[in-house]
Amino acid sequence: MNAIAWSEDDLEILHTQIWEALATATTDHSFAWRTPVLASFGLGEPDARTVVLREADPQSRALICFSDHRTRKVAELHINSVAAWCFYDPVARVQLRARGETRVNINNDLAHRIWREMPQSSRRLYASTPKPGERIALPWEIPFGDRPMDNFAVLVTTIRELDWLHLGESGHRRARFRWDRDAWEGHWAAP
Ligand SMILES: Cc1cc2nc3c(=O)[nH]c(=O)nc-3n(C[C@H](O)[C@H](O)[C@H](O)COP(=O)(O)O)c2cc1C
């Protein structure tokens, strides 16, 4: 990952750079933004976990990850669809927080299309008979079922707020962007 020359003073450029960096993170395994934290709040207490960012699309404002629909996060998102994503690049010391409504896609066209393109080794991740988080006797004794596709979920968050923060040697900079009807509105903010 080549270092991003984050714009010093132009919010529009900065916003474009944010989405470019997110797109890069979906393919560049060396970029820490590839594994953000996804937070949800649906079952009475907040919860957060690491996920892999699979797609980032500035046109639809979508951030996408894959999951097992039997996980706690999916149960939470069914109750409260608002999710917060947090990315941190320790090299550039840049944090990005993104928030929006999340749609859980199970057994629909999108889930089927992604499943078809997924390697067998990844499909296995969704094959366990015990639900993720369920108690088992030993960590390597996991029974597998033969319908992993049934457990596969594609989580699509439509982002409506972005909060970018750079911790710089000569000072910190923060910018916030909010989707307002049909355009992004951005401003600088006190860090
Ligand atoms: C580096 C890393 C990447 C992960 N990627 C995903 C992912 O893309 N999707 C996912 O559901 N869980 C992923 N996990 C596992 C989650 O962090 C979490 O343990 C699991 O999904 C259960 O979370 P929940 O009970 O809060 O739903 C990943 C864990 C690590 C350490």
Image (cartoon, grey):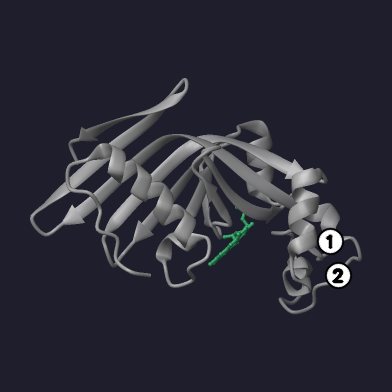
**Residue drawn at x 26%, y 60% as measured from the top left:** 93
Asked where in the image residue 167 lies, by quadrant, the reply is bottom left
The amino acid beneath tag 2 is Phe
Q: Residues within 10 Å of mark 2 (few under 14, many from 20)?
A: some
Say whether marks 1 and 2 touch (CB < 8 Å). Answer: yes
- Say which residue label 2 marks: 144
Q: Secondary structure at mark 2?
A: loop
Q: Which residue is more in the foreground, 145 or 181?
A: 181
Q: Secondary structure at mark 1?
A: helix
Q: Residues within 10 Å of mark 1 (few under 14, many from 20)?
A: some
> Which percent across, then down, holds residue 62?
55, 42
Point out the residue furthest to the top here. Answer: 181
- Say which residue label 1 marks: 148
Depth check, mark 1 against mark 2: the one in front is 1
Determine the quadrant in which ligand 1 lies.
bottom right
> Which percent across, then down, holds residue 14?
29, 45
Q: Which residue is more in the foreground, 140 or 88?
A: 88
Q: Which residue is more in the foreground, 172 or 17?
A: 17
